[in-house]
Image: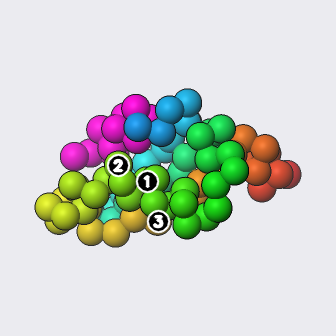
């Protein structure tokens, strides 16, 4: 799968999130911003993303994933 296909998969599963995916080989960087993460700790947010990508990770299509996962408010604070 390419970056856009993975981003689209995550957008469907992580309802209402703005998702950007970049990669180098089979190492992916996911940035997701959305209310979906409201009230979740860091580990729970990562589990949500891994749940979506588990089949691709198991198949070896994705080897590694780095994540930056924010609520809109957190993202706004991080950018200022």
Instruction: Specify whether residue 9 is painted magenta.
Output: yes
**Residue 54 in picture, x, y percent from top left:** 28, 57
Tell me what residue is drawn at x 39 percent, y 64 percent. 65
- Please, what is the dominant secondary structure of the magenta stretch? helix
Relative to 77, residue 41 above or below: below
In primary-sequence order, the first of circles 3 and 2 is 2
Which residue occupies the foreground of this view, 60 or 26?
60
In primary-sequence order, the first of circles 3 and 1 is 1
Tell me if 74 is positioned left or right of 80 in this view: left
3 and 1 marks in contact (CB < 8 Å) = no
Q: CA distance from mark 1 to mark 2?
A: 5 Å
Which residue occupies the foreground of this view, 51 or 10?
51
Circle 2 crowding by C-alpha within 10 Å: few under 14, some 14–19, many from 20? some
Numbered tag placed on residue 40 in the rendering: none
3 and 2 marks in contact (CB < 8 Å) = no
Q: Is residue 8 visible?
A: yes
> Which residue is identified by label 2?
52
Q: Nearer the viewer, mark 3 or mark 2?
A: 2
The quadrant holding residue 3 is: top left
**Residue 47 in picture, x, y percent from top left:** 45, 60
Tell me if 80 is positioned left or right of 8 in this view: right
Numbered tag placed on residue 49 in the rendering: 1
Q: Of helix, strand and loop, which one carries label 2?
A: helix
Tell me what residue is drawn at x 46 percent, y 65 percent. 66
> Which residue is identified by label 3?
66
Tell me what residue is drawn at x 27 percent, y 68 percent. 63
């Amino acid at each position: 799968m390419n970056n856009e296909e993975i981003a689209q998969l995550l957008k469907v599963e992580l309802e209402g999130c703005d998702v950007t995916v970049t990669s180098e080989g089979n190492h992916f960087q996911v940035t997701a911003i959305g209310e979906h993460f409201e009230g979740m700790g860091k580990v729970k947010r990562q589990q949500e993303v891994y749940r979506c990508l588990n089949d691709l990770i198991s198949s070896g299509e994705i080897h590694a994933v780095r994540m930056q996962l924010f609520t809109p408010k957190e993202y706004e604070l991080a950018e200022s």
